[in-house]
Image (cartoon, rainbow, N blue to C red):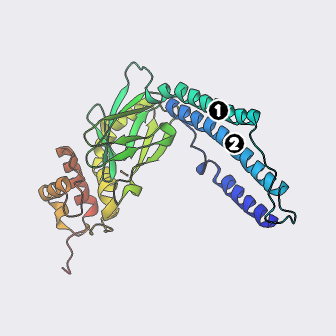
Amino acid sequence: MLLTFVAVAVLATAGIAAAANGGFAPPAPHSPNAARTTTAYYVILGFTGAIFLLVETLLVGFVWKYRSRGRARTTDGAQVHGHTRLELIWTVIPVVILCVIGLVVFYELPGISSAPAAANPLRITVEGHQFYWQFDYPNGARSINDLHAPVGQVVDLDVVSSDVVHSWWIPPLGGKIQAIPGRTNHVWFKADKQGTYTGQCAELCGLYHATMAARVIVGTEAEYTRFVTSTAKTGLGRAEFQGACATCHGMQGEGGYGPNLASNPLLTQPTALTAIVRNGRNRMPAVGDTWTKEQMQALAQYVKAHVYKGAATNG
Ligand code: CUA
């Protein structure tokens, strides 16, 4: 019995050790709001963890101490009535703990929800779609699934949705916020380090919710400028196909949940392609309902050049 308990305990802790930061703790924060959320998390974890240990230790201790030792099952235990001091203690201590937690949370909250004042904050629109993310930059550039941002700058995000409720969440860069049709929500980040930060749609939004991942790629100011002024445009068709179409139709258009596209002549007919991508058909959602003419052109060029393999000959 004891051996089993020890074995289980060892296995459980080995799992935690192996998972390191990957399982139980939040990822290392790289934005001031994320740092504050993490602080609140650890303060609450500290109290709840200590209480858990105290209660479980006492429980096991008492089970051991007051075990039956062969007493008759019907024998009554000692009768105890009221203990004012003890009752005061177990009322006052939780009240104090809750006050401390409340104070910490209310102290951290303003710095989580409001962006710090910045001379010229960068405003980017985040649009949730079944099943990808679309980003609009101030100069009109667009990107899919990868949000590019400069390091050390306050980035204000206007979060919207074109179909159902999604939830924007990049854990190292701050808390999650829902993308709700007909409403604009706000969230922000200020990345302290260059790198790629990953996140995931955090609201069940349909069949491919699980694949609705997002990345925030934080680079230098120059890298950001290069992206929004040139790379975003040249890579748009590819990003659209791989981010939106490939989810159902496969990376090479080989088919998956959606039909095979590689041999579909529709890929060479921009007008017909635009109609189906903008409006959807049957189970296909209107993935491109907010896509511009330039975006449709970029997609048409990409699929014709890289996805279409010629019409099937065995019809
Ligand atoms: Cu979008 Cu889940």
Question: Is 196 above or below relative to 62?
Answer: above
Q: Residue at x 62, y 47 (%)?
A: 21
In this view, 71 is above or below 172:
below
Q: Quadrant of residue 229?
A: top left
Quarter of the N terminus within the rendering? bottom right
Instruction: Please indicate whether residue 17 sits to the left or right of residue 187 in the image.
Output: right
Residue 268 appears left or right of 226: left
Residue beneath disc 1: 97
CA gap, disc 2 and disc 1: 10 Å
Q: Is residue 70 visible?
A: yes
Image location of residue 173, percent across then percent down: 48, 37
On whether ligand 1 comes within 8 Å of the CB at mark 1, the answer is no
Q: Residues within 10 Å of mark 1 (few under 14, many from 20)?
A: some
Q: Earlier in the sequence, mark 2 or mark 1?
A: 2
Q: Residue furthest right?
A: 69
Residue 54, percent across and down?
Answer: 74, 44
Q: Are marks 2 and 1 in contact (CB under 8 Å)?
A: yes
* Residue sitting at the far bottom: 314
Give the residue displayed 20% in from the left and 64% down from the top: 282
Q: Amino acid at mark 1?
A: Ile
Residue ID for mark 2:
51
* Label 2 crowd (10 A; few <14 / some 14-19 / many >=20): few
Three-letter amino acid code of the residue under disc 2 = Ile
Determine the secondary structure under disc 1. helix
Locate the C terminus and report the quarter of the image it occupies.
bottom left
Q: Which mark is residue 212?
A: none
The percent position of residue 261, horizontal first and vertical second, equals 25, 66
Q: Is residue 221 left or right of residue 279?
A: right
Q: Going 20% across and 78% down the picture, which residue do you hit?
A: 313
